[in-house]
Amino acid sequence: MKELKIYNSLTKKKENFIPINKGKIGMYVCGPTVYDYPHIGNARPLVVFDVLYRLLKKIYGNNKVTYVRNITDIDDKIIESSKKNKKSINELTETITKSFHEDCRYLYCLNPTFEPKATEHIKEMIRMVSNLLKNNHAYENKNHVYFSVSSFKKYGKLSNKNFEQLVAGSRVEVSEYKKDPLDYVLWKPSDEKDPGWDSPWGRGRPGWHLECSVMSEKFLGKQFDIHGGGLDLVFPHHEN
């Protein structure tokens, strides 16, 4: 079998691809947040990871590769777009998701093995937040739950930055409820007009980073071979 080399964002170099489990490949790619129609920049990762998916299937066999690509159908951007366009959340997300799938067909991309939607996995998200709180990796403040970045000493390794660099040069959400500027939201409260689900911390909705953590673990386990997405997602999304 010929060697397959893939660029590793963690080590910043091309490395021989060696599956965690021989003959079984797991790949998770961050899909669209369906608040607006896809643009040309969204098409690039679609094509790149479609090519990789085809190559992995060719090398390891059609039934040996599990490709998961999510749909983020609950997010602050979606809520804002819904209000701006005077459409319900469901109408907006269904319309944009349909357009995304049409683009996939026009680009001749294969369907992923699984395409989970965030709203289909709220129970699992609540469970993960509860576990993080139990293990002192998160904290609650007035119905907001945040991941405590200081509890994970290797934070910043993927983006190759230290804490000071991350705070100074990144898209960090400002909030009065945080203990540390880099802490990120796992669960936030929803008012009566916005989508929300009952939880131990009150009615609310999940944070973006939590969603992908839960869906990737559900379909691929806690450790899998490839986590892909656009370059702009390295920090904060993939780091988180």
Image (spheres, rainbow, N blue to C red):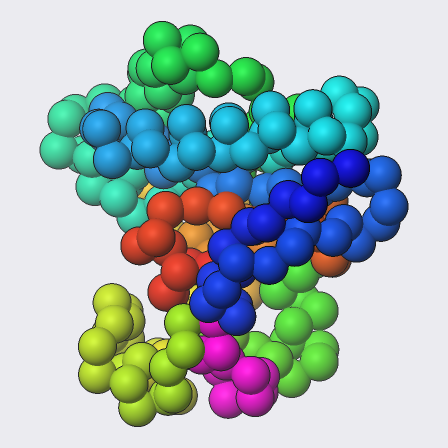
> Is 213 placed above or below 215 here?
below
Question: Per the image, is 35 magenta?
Answer: no
Q: Is residue 37 left or right of residue 63?
A: left
Residue 12: % across, % down: 46, 67
Q: Is residue 186 left or right of residue 36?
A: right
Which segment is the magenta one? 149-158
Q: In this orientation, does residue 114 appear? A: no
Q: Quadrant of the N terminus?
A: top right
Q: Is residue 228 left or right of residue 191?
A: right
Question: Per the image, is 152 magenta?
Answer: yes
Q: Which is more toward the observer, 30 or 194?
A: 30
Q: Residue furthest right?
A: 22
**How many marks are shown on the rendered structure?**
0
Residue 170: % across, % down: 25, 72
Which residue lies at the image location 64% right of the left edge and 44% below the top edge?
A: 4
> Is 102 placed above or below 150 here?
above
Residue 142: % across, % down: 42, 75
Which residue lies at the image location 77% right of the left edge and 31% below the top edge?
A: 60
Residue 20: % across, % down: 79, 54
Q: In this orientation, does residue 15 appear? A: yes
Q: Main secondary structure of the magenta part?
A: loop
> Is 193 placed above or below 198 here?
above
> Is 85 placed above or below 225 here?
above
Which residue lies at the image location 52% right of the left edge and 41% below the top edge?
A: 29
Q: Residue furthest left?
A: 84
Q: Which is more toward the observer, 222 or 122?
A: 222
Q: Is residue 95 left or right of residue 122?
A: left
Which residue lies at the image location 37% right of the left edge and 82% below the top edge?
A: 161
Q: Which is more toward the observer, 1 or 131?
A: 1
